[in-house]
Amino acid sequence: MNRLDAGTMGGAFEQAPLKVDHLLHPWSEILRVLTGGNPLRPVQELAVHEAHILETRQHLVVSAPTNSGKSLVGHLVLLDAVLRGRRAVLLEPLRALAQEQSDTLTDLMAELSQQGFARAPKVRLSTGEYRPDGELPTAAPPEEGEIIVATPERLDAILRDPKNAAWASTIGAVVVDEAHLLRDPRRGPTLELLVASMLSVTPPARVALLSATVGEPVRLREWLKPCQIIVSSDRTLLRKQVWQLASDEDPDEVIANELGAVLCEPSAAAIVFVYRRSSADALATGLSRVLSISVLAYHSGQSASEHARIRSQFLIGACRCLVATTALGMGVNLPATHVFIRDATFFGFGRLRVDELLQILGRAGRGDRGGSGAVLVRSSDAWTGEDLARALREEAVPPLRSSFETVVTQGRPGTPDETDGAALAAASLVATCLVRAGEDGLDAAAISALLANTLGGRALVSRIDGALRWLIDPSRVIAFRGEGGCFQLTTLGKIGVKSMLPLPYLGGVGQLVRDLIFLDTQAKLLWRWSSLDHLILVSLLSDRAPKLRRFSEELAGQIDGWFESRPTTEKSLLFAEWIMGTAEGSKADELFGSLGIADRRPSLPGSNVARKKAYSAMLAAIILDERSRGAPLSEIERRWGVSGLEGLEETWRDTALWLLSGHAALFEVRAFYYHLYEQCGATATQIRDIKRALEQISGHAYDLLEQLKYCSPLGPMLRAIRSSLRGTQGAMIGTGTIRKLESSGITSMAQIARMDLGALVKAGTPKRFAKQIHAYSRRRLR
């Protein structure tokens, strides 16, 4: 291994004693609590004593390295809004980071209360998995104030409902952590529109952008004016290295050897960053065995209680090494002396950028103690050791540009007139503006006025006309132009946009259902729809569908055999009627036409591109189907000749859950009533029959959501017990009980059937839940 010097970041800096007595009440008391009585760090000194952020309501941009103390600046902005009687919102890019910040703020507010602070606000978490307890969207902030910690997508979902406009008007400040994500083509558009929305209300909410990797932050002043810019390069010393591995070196062995030396120092603590959740679990287990110490995995697949337990063990020193995913490296706030990045290149996605690596390396350093960070580079990586070391020394951070200022090719077919990602993002933002406007709609001038407030306003406004044409296209029918010239969403558009379905996805599903109704107004086709059809749509239309195995006629035959073995009620309409068949017999191209899927590359005669893609999508659907029934990953991999499902399956299942929640809302007759009445001339009886069929299809989607939330061999038992007890009083068995059973080695219904009540309790099951399991088991044996 060749250790390459990659320079240093930060260094020693002077800290004067905490001086806050001159500040107006109650800021002196608040700062003593937030700092723990310690001196202000340089970026905090700039914010409080030079920029005077507590005496002004100007917008704010804070550009400072990781571990510099800028989070406290964001907390001050939040509390300032609360003291003014407004709500405050902290946006975190990941649910795990939102949970972490929620816990931190909750502890800080508890300390304020203990110090006699009368208005310590409530802290609420809202990320999609969590909803603020007892919160009514139209309610005024509670008397003591309220800080909401949310993901951008969650806040966007709340604001998409016009009924929540009054709730949104109570927001006095929005603090955006990891604000450099504004440049990200996937996350940036949502975040940018949220900021623009806050700037568009009267009076505008105060916006604070925090980031360690904002290049040329002065440019943001024009966007947010009036705006203060706070730039600091001070932080505790960070020594950076790149480790170039030889082709025969195992990175896990290298890390284990280094940790063995580093952790001999009792005050040292380390975090190892890897790409996948499954890698974090496997490496933590391996390091624990090799080093004979407690090494824990830490990733977004864990529950909030697990995160709290792991954080607590790390903070008190019971565990001095964590293995975390690089996604959490954006903001995981756990003090470590050493950071190791094992995976700098992601298979199928490319290499991490310099600013992303600097962000993660910056996690090294504890309080005033410096840190060390190393990036491992394999011979097969996209980086070379020398190039990466030079880039880390130079710390060249790209300027913060709007995602709309660069045309980003999505690589997904199906949008022939608007093929680039920025144009599709523009249509998505216009649709979001329309759904927020409600029944009144907006004209093009009003849409332009709102979107002009985005960072990329100039580039975006020029795309509005094209975006509107895309939305009202007859093949999509997502929006229409009313008699007064205002644009409004159709019922299909409202449901889909509120459900946060991607627009091409929404358009494809809508056109397919309209085509099925046109072919058969008696609803015979729709009555044949099964749960598997939902999974096929998810696999065909999602750009996140995994590529599990290359197409072959052998695979097609295996899928055909699997399908034929299904009960009639579980067979797929779409597969049976359009996909299944030989190269000459399959009608997959017709299905693709309905869904709006087109291949930009010219197809050779006889190439059957649509059929091959459809069979590949069917395999992805089968994986989800079998997981929903509790099939173990090892069994699925063996049966279907695929590998690497662990980790990949989690991400794919998360995507399916998101899209299926949209399906559950979308399949209702209101979304297709105009088509039924005007285009098909359907009678009242036909409309009634189609309504019933759509209700059944929606029910399939709800059932799938329940099945996919917890995929385990014991999952069917969990769902059956909860279903049988629905409507009764008292607590019902949950996933925690199932996990306890599995951790005790109980992973099948055959094992459950051999256990009596005492054995279930001995396995860690609370007695009231053990009774529910035992009763269910006895019923099955009758």
Image (cartoon, grey):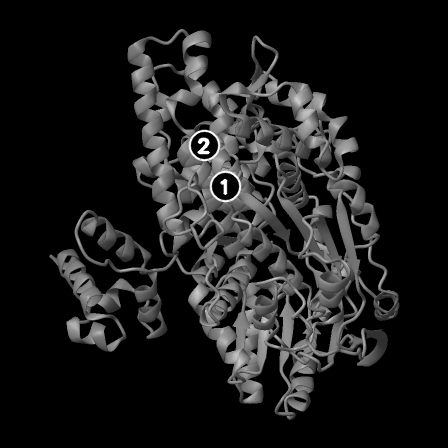
Q: Is residue 61 above or below residue 510?
A: below
Q: Residue furthest left?
A: 782
Give coordinates of residue 18: x percent, y percent. 68, 75
Residue plotted at (38% across, 44% down): 704
Q: Secondary structure at mark 2?
A: helix
Check disc 2 and give the amino acid type: Lys
First in sequence, mark 2 or 1: give its number. Answer: 2
Residue plotted at (69% across, 31% down): 451
Q: Is residue 298 above or below residue 575?
A: below
For the C terminus, give its image quadrant: bottom left
Give coordinates of residue 280: x percent, y percent. 57, 70
Front position among marks 2 and 1: 2
The reply to whether callout 2 and callout 1 are in contact (CB within 8 Å) is: no
Left or right: where 54 falls relative to 541 = right
Question: Can residue 237 be spotted in the picture?
Answer: yes
In this rendered view, identify the residue nearer to me: 276 or 570: 276
For the N terminus, give its image quadrant: bottom right
Provide the residue designation for mark 1: 618
Left or right: where 314 falls relative to 382 = left
Check disc 1 and give the amino acid type: Met
In this rendered view, identify the residue nearer to me: 412 or 48: 48
Count residues near mark 2 (Cα–Cα under 10 Å), then give few for <14, some for 14-19, many for 20+.
some
Q: Say the numbered circle drawn on residue 179.
A: none
- Distance, label 2 to label 1, CA atoms, is 39 Å
Count residues near mark 1 (Cα–Cα under 10 Å), then give few for <14, some for 14-19, many for 20+.
many
